[in-house]
């Protein structure tokens, strides 16, 4: 079946602008994670959804970052007043259910803030 | 929270040799330890994982060992091939939690 998809694949924006990044998890996967990967580093956790609710948002760096998953499937990561330091690849991953460990990653969205 | 350290940061081997990458973790509650391979510009792909009730797991040329007492785990790749060249990440998590990743190892297999 189809894997995790993310749109857009690339996003270039200006400092101060608002951006939305979308993640479509694997159908039927109840858990969804957002990570951020800077160049040369491992992915860093941002937020985790179990169903529609954010089970853990401890990785969000500040209140400019927000994410939703209103119907328990597609998720949107929203970044307000973007800063140059927000430039990174934003990865989404989904997991089937609490009894399954494997996380499947999407291709990522490369965000560049000029 | 969890902290995962990974080394070496770069590793160059000759084709056919073995490669070993090591990670340590800090949270004794962690019980799931996956390894991901990431090629340039691509998504991380799971290559092998191990749970804390198992000490070793093997899948063809790839094996992972876990020492829960010492809180370290290792990836072993035997008979390396040029297509094994990539960045490898270890990670750790406890039940239902997000993964904490190591900083990555860039493996270069020289033909």
Image (tube, coloured by chain):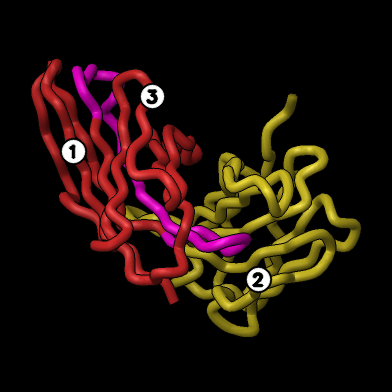
Q: Indicate yes or no whether the magenta region holds residue A76.
A: no
Instruction: Determine whether B76 is above or below B8 in the image.
Output: above
Query: Which numbered circle lies on residue B59?
Result: 3
Q: Residue at x 68, y 33 (%)?
A: A3
Residue A77 relative to residue B89: left or right? right
* Pointer 1 residue: B20
- The magenta stretch is B77-100
- Tell me, yes or no, whether dots 2 and 1 are on the same chain: no
Report the Cα–Cα distance between label 2 and label 1: 39 Å
Report the Cα–Cα distance between label 3 and label 1: 15 Å
Q: Residue at x 28, y 62 (%)?
A: B69
Residue at disc 3, secondary structure:
strand
Labels 3 and 1 touching (C-beta < 8 A): no
Q: Residue at x 58, y 49 (%)?
A: A109
Query: Which numbered circle lies on residue A79?
Result: 2
Measured from the top left, where is residue B34 in percent x and y? Answer: 44, 45
For disc 1, the neighbor class at 10 Å (few under 14, some 14 to 19, many from 20) is some
């Amino acid at each position: 079946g189809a894997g995790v998809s993310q749109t857009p694949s690339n996003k270039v924006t200006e400092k101060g602008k608002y951006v939305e990044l979308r993640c479509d998890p694997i159908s039927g996967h109840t858990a969804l994670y957002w990570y951020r990967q800077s160049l040369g580093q491992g992915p860093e956790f941002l937020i985790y959804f179990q169903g529609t609710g954010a089970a853990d948002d401890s990785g969000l760096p500040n209140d400019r970052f927000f994410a939703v998953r209103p119907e328990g499937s597609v998720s949107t990561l929203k970044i307000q007043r973007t800063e140059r330091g927000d430039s990174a690849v934003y990865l989404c991953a989904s997991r089937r259910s609490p009894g399954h460990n494997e996380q499947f990653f999407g291709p990522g969205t490369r965000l560049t803030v000029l | 929270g969890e902290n995962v350290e990974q080394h070496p940061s770069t590793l160059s081997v000759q084709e056919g040799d073995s490669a070993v990458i090591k990670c340590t973790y800090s949270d004794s509650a962690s019980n799931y330890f996956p390894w991901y391979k990431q090629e340039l510009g691509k998504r991380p792909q799971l290559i092998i994982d191990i749970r804390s009730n198992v000490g070793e797991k093997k899948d063809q040329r790839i094996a992972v060992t876990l020492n829960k007492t010492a809180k370290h785990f290792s990836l072993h790749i035997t008979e390396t091939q040029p297509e094994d060249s990539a960045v490898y990440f270890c990670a750790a998590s406890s039940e239902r939690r997000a993964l904490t990743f190591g900083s990555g190892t860039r493996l270069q297999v020289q033909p």
